[in-house]
Amino acid sequence: MIDEDGYFGERVAAQYDESSADVSDPAVVDPIVNALADLACGGRVLELGIGTGRIALPLAARGVQVHGIDLSRAMVSRLRAKPGGESIGVTIGDFATARVDGGFSLAYIVFNTIMNLTTQEAQVACFRNVAAHLQPGGRFVVEVMVPDLRRLPPGQDVVPFHVSPTRWAYDHYDIATQTMTSNYVEVVNGRGGYRSIPFRYVWPAELDLMAQLAGLQIRHRWSGWTGEPFTNESAQHVSVWEKPVLTDLN
C-alpha cells in the first residue's frame, strides 16, 4: 500500500469524482438508490467502501440512515465536504474486519469494490463481517463485474481499456491466482505518471459459497439495478443474499 489510506490516498481522492463522473450521473445513480432504498425496508444501512459518497449521499437524502466504512481518510474528507456529508457516520477501517455498533437491515458494496479485497481470505472475512452486522432478515447486496476472461486470447494477459494521446489504461490478469491490476499511464504538461491498483476478481458461484460460509442465502441475482435477468452474456451482476430469520420450533 502507498500510505495509511491504501491505494485511495490523496492523489487518487483529489481527482476521484472527476474521473468517475460517468457513473455519478443521475441516470446511473438513481436506479441504484431506488433499489437499495427498497431493499432496506426503512431500516439502517451499511455501505462498505463509502468513498466520496456517490451512493450514500443520495440514499441519505431519501431519508435512509446510512453508515459507512472506508479505509481512506482522503476519500472520506471529500464526502464530508459535500452537502449532507457531515451527517453520515463513517468508521475508518478495513471493511472486511471493521465493526460498527448496532444492527443493519441492509449492507451493500457497489462498483466492483469487493475486488479491492485482494485475497480470497479477505473476501470471505468480508461476508462474515457483514453477516455479523445484519439483523435477521437483513440483506447483503454486491455489484461486481463478471470476470471478462473471454477478452484474453491464448497467451495474452493484458487488456487495454483506454487509449488516448495523453492517457493509457490497461488491466493485467494473473489467471492462476485470480488477481489483476488496473494500470494507468498519464502525461500532464509533458510529465508522465503511473499508478497501479490491485484487485482480485471473483466468480458469482464463488461469492455464493462465501455467502453460504457466512450463513447467508441467495435471494436475487440480476444483471442490473432494475432487475434485468442475469444471463450468460451479462457483464456484471447485482446479487442479494439474506440472513435467515431464526424461528422457535418449541
Image (cartoon, rainbow, N blue to C red):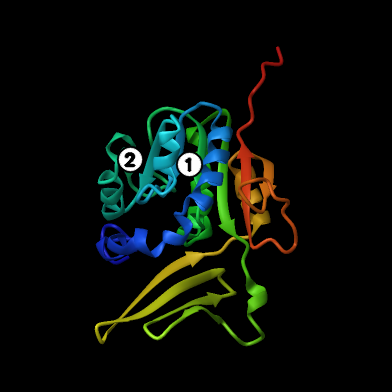
Nearer to me, 159 or 229: 229
Of badges 2 and 1, the one in the foreground is: 2
For marks 2 and 1 on the same chain, the one whose residue lies earlier in the sequence: 2
The amino acid pointed to by label 1 is: Asn
- The residue at 64%/30% (across/down) is 244
Q: Which mark is residue 168?
A: none
Q: Quadrant of residue 190?
A: bottom left
Location of residue 137 in the rendering, given as x and y in whole percent from the top left corner: 60, 28
Location of residue 110 in the rendering, given as x and y in whole percent from the top left corner: 50, 51
Q: Which mark is residue 129?
A: 1
- The residue at 51%/41% (across/down) is 33
Task: Tell me whether circle 2 and circle 1 mark residues in contact (CB < 8 Å).
Answer: no
- The residue at 47%/62% (across/down) is 118
Q: Name the residue under label 2.
A: 90
Quarter of the picture holding the N terminus: bottom left
Quarter of the picture holding the C terminus: top right
Location of residue 42 in the rendering, given as x and y in whole percent from the top left corner: 51, 26
Location of residue 157 in the rendering, given as x and y in whole percent from the top left corner: 56, 82
The residue tagged with tag 2: helix, strand or loop? Answer: strand
